[in-house]
Image (cartoon, coloured by chain):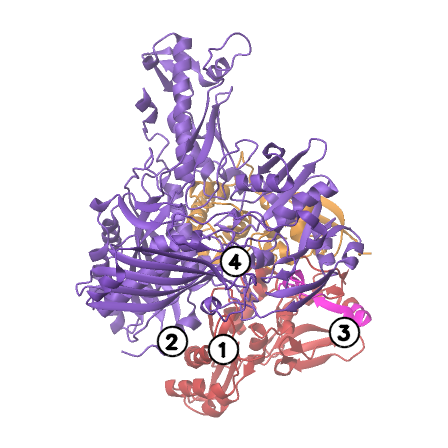
Chain colours: A purple, B orange, C red
Amino acid sequence: MKDRGDTVTGKYFGQPVLRLEDKHLLTGRAKFCDDIVIPGMLHAAFLRSDYAHAIIKNIDVTEARKHPGVVAVYTAEDMGDYWKVGPLQVPPPFAIKGAQFNARTLPPIAKGKVRFSGEPIAVVIAESRYIAEDACEDIIFDAEPLPAVIDLEKAWEDTSVLVHDDLPSNMAALVKQESGDYEAAKKQADVVVSHRYVADHVAGAAMENRGFVVNWDERTQEMTVWAGTQAPLPLRSAIASRMGLVENQVRVITPYIGGGFGPKVMTSQADDVLLPWISMKLNRPIKWIEDRRENFLATTSERDQVHHCEMALKKDGTILGFKDIFYHNTGAYDPYGMTVPLNTQTHTVSNYRVPNFYTEIRMVFTNEMVVTPVRGAGRSEGVFVMERMMDLAARELKMDPVEIRLKNLLKKEEFPLNTGVIGQDFVVGVLDSGDYKNNLEKCIQMIDYEKFRNEIQPKARKEGKHLGIGVVTFTEGTAVGPYEGARVTVGNNGKVSVATGYSTQGQGHFTVFAQIVAEQLNVKVEDVRVITGDTGHFHWGAGTFASRGATIAGSAIHSAAVLVREKIFATAAKLLDVPEDQVELCEGSVCVKGHPEKSVSLGDLAGKANPMRGAVEADVKPGLEATAYYAPPHGATGSGACAMIVDVDPETCKVNIERFVLVHDCGTVINPLLLEGQIQGGVSMGIGNAFYEKMVYDENGQLMTASFMDYLMPQATDMPKRMEIGHNVHPSPLNTLGLKGVGEAGALPPPPAFCQAVEDALYEYDLDLTESNLNPSLLYKFKNEATKR
Amino acid sequence: MAQLIKIKVTVNDTVYEREVEPRLLLSDFIRHELGLFGTHVGCEHGMCGACTILFDGEPVRSCLIFAVQANGHEIKTVESLGTPEHLHPLQEAFNEKHGLQCGFCTPGILMTVVPFLEENPHPSEDEIREAIDGNICRCTGYEKIIESVQAASEKMSSGK
Amino acid sequence: MKPAQFDYFAPASVEEALDKLAELGYDGKVLAGGQSLIAAMNFRMARPGALVDLNNIPELSFIKPTADGGLAIGTMTRVHTVEHSPEVIKRFPLLPEVAHYIGHAQIRRRGSFGGAIAHADPSGQLPGIAKVMNAKCLIRSKDKEDRWVDATDLIIGPFMTVIEYEDLLTEVVLPPNPPRTGSSYQQVARQNGGYALAACASVLTLDEKNHCQDARLILMGVGEMPILSDKIKEILIGQEPTEAAFKAVGEAVQSEIDPSTDLNGTAEYRRDLIRVLVPRSLALSLERAKKGS
């Protein structure tokens, strides 16, 4: 009986089903956070510090309070006992031996000291956002500026100015992980290469900024929150606990969200701490819609690491060992624990066989906004430095970059393979499945590597053109725990509802979750209505991060659907008076095998399963409904390879990507159309990181790139003409459906592939690109510093 | 006391008369005064293109125009295209080719592409790329948007 | 990011506009296309007390041939209109060539030709192009005589011109090019529609011996305002336009430019871009001049 529920026929699952959510989005009918209107609603604006580091002397809000249209103004002083620093949203994994971690979590609003430019120092509540911004200008903020801590390596030194002066240094964390004996391996090496690499700072920059609407209803004693959050349940719990409410007094609803990409997973910031409290105080609904400037200044961002790497190899290119000591900027506080640098550790030593390694995280506090995951989330940096080190080794050994990779990639027979590195999910990483070599082989075949090397490139060079190729590989640790859950219910009209605590920001969950259910219940995909991220509908779950939606929430939904299917069979068999193995699902109904006239519609069956009178057997639950959870033992690892051909103008240092190929393996595919969309979107972010995007803080801690005029987002004309995508399918053994995540894959390989390709293109120079975020001027600098061959 | 100015604006063929402060951005007017929430605001400095609307038939950024300046003019927003039940062929194409993910930038892209396809019913891929260059999309990498516009141009020229 | 309060006036004629500007004095600010001004106001980096909106003055939007074969362009003519005007394309192909690089399509639909010149943004293209094209600007005000100012004298610093607060730039006149004139624009920007890291435009006129009768070159993004080169005249006028001579111009103008370092490029990089772009532009202008247009 059990296995019947698990069959996947592929009627809906695996098909390029068109998205159910599109129609409302395309016609402007989808409801986003700023579309929420509540009678009597007030508007919030934050006054933010221009100083990156300063002692607060005085905040005078007298004039602001008098401003016509202003209802209230609050500073930390006005909050009394309610002011306290936020929770440690992600604790560090204590399983790592000797790991040191100094928790300094985010204050909702500055008190005593400001530690980054953009830190909120007062909030104005007014009749309109325009007025609220006017009144912010009436506030007199008096502070004594301190030197800003910006340079990561200098911040680590004992002589540095302190971000938190109650700590002896700017050390936020120190984590060492090792396997084998690197120093012993080094002694046996024929070649040791070492280098310093920089993975620079980038923004998530979702097109919709953050937003928060809260309404405290004094009469029902309930609080409703609409928020553009990736973590509705943690947000609900955080609000309830701070407000002294029980969880069912707070309902968090995620409306349509215009992209997440990581930063929207943060809770316990100024908006969600202050506004619920103020809404209760004023007994009025309040809306705060972040603007783009605030998003750059005071929403979290990521990358920003400096690595000192060393690799020991045999003459034939075999890796004997790898050592990486890296500085990671956590910003002014570290509420998100060590997720990002742990991801870096797990991804530097992941796809290649590295028998001996030593990696060390030096996480530092700086006077910058907090760093939390952005699509790529530490993996990008790990992939970048490892791939660059492979290129460095290849150059030293005069090997082809593809050859050295093929030599060291893990073989499929080696899986499952224990990596020996504890990751963001607090357990030792296990690479579950895949064929890394085949990814690479397929990739070089797709880009015609041999032909490029032997024909195209020599010919181009004769013509004075500078074409270069870059080929890299990567893994993507995805689908980590702890768990997600879902409830599947057949309605009285025969349509199916799914509720999950997982929240969605454009990935297509309304469709892929419906496909999973439709497959099990043999109903049309459009007859499955999915509700994501509404704590009033489902109140368990962790949130949207680490490419885990389809795998973790999807597996829970699948399990719930299987249970509902079993209940359908049991209920129908009883009703139709036949044995359970004699009933089957026809579209929208249950019929007796061989007797299609003997059937009951799913809607009628749902009614029967929920009798309003009479007796129900003791252990029978009402309705055609089931709730299920899925918790993986560890993450599932996707993998891939990526190649690009670039055309460089050596005089202007402008670069065009002529061809782009990416081969990917995320296990079983639920929807190939949406899968392509996920990869392509990731790639655009990766290309953006490689040549356009960079957050720049000056030495005073001022963010120089707080607008789209200075922070360059990749545009249509910046992208390669075609992203040629190849697929490998090695189902994960970790879950029934064989799923692995894919959300961040595309973002990982472009920066190292770009560097390798540009170095290859500018062949007259001994170019050594050590930064992940290039631009023409920086490339020009590297070119001028390189010796001419 | 702030100056209030009476304006009369035609939006999606409906005439609206309102009194507005001069500083009210047209994007805010459309969204919060008229309740037409399909026009999205992504940057308020003219860079992202999410708030693109048609102003007397021309695609412009509604965050870089004051509502008072719309007095006597005709505006079209995404709500003027299809409905969920009857999509415009351009919207159909975006659905079929997966030309959107979070959908936040999409109304601005549609309102850029509508007049573009009117002027250039059979654009090349390069022309499409350039036409949507002033609209930032963080989700799709643009490839499927371009495929959508190509598909729409075929649909619209064949009258389907 | 909402603008601060201001008073708003929408005159229906140039006369009304001049009256209002005179009345408002220092508090008044002209609102043309607004594509730079309103963005700055949204950041509250600009906060004029009052705006005098030119968008309701039809007489400011025109492209008219002048008697001598040039063109007069009204200040409120949209950049998009200039870019696509057959008259402009025929007489001054340089203008549409440059216009195409100004912001994105939606910005060009609204942004105005005269507004972009009067804004005098050192990274903007049109102020420099007006200079290299020998444009004449008509400046009017209520209490003063109408003034014709050469574009070369109009800009006096970054975002600074000789246009005073009560003045209005109403039209720009482009004098005709002699026969056998070719022009071209070259720029390096990080993205389409973005500001140029460095740019130049050249206008070459050949005599019957195919020597340079006139040579004009504007260098942009490499100083506080667009720089009209003198060096080019020393090197090219009366001379045969050769590749070597063009390279020499690229070198010689190094003493005329004063680029600075910012987020997008170092001064050194910008210098080298000029070194590369100037010969490229001159070669292209020569090719076009030879074709006789």
Q: In the picture provided, is A55 more to the left or to the right than C52?
A: left
Q: CA distance from mark 3 to mark 2?
A: 46 Å
* Label 1 and label 4 in one chain: no
Rendering coords of residue A713 (x, y %): 49, 59
Q: Give the labeled residue for mark 2.
A: A651
Q: CA distance from mark 2 to mark 4?
A: 27 Å
Task: Say what amino acid the circle numbered 2 marks.
Answer: Glu
* Label 2 and label 1 in one chain: no
**Of B125 and A587, the residue lying toward us:** A587
User: Which numbered disc, 2 or 4, marks the residue closer to the eye?
Assistant: 2
Q: Give the labeled residue for mark 1.
A: C200
Task: Say what amino acid the circle numbered 1 marks.
Answer: Cys
Q: Secondary structure at mark 2?
A: loop
Q: Give the labeled residue for mark 4.
A: B134
Q: Are marks 1 and 3 in contact (CB under 8 Å)?
A: no
Task: Say what amino acid the circle numbered 4 marks.
Answer: Gly
Mark 1 crowd level (few <14, some 14–19, many ≥20, 10 Å Cα): many
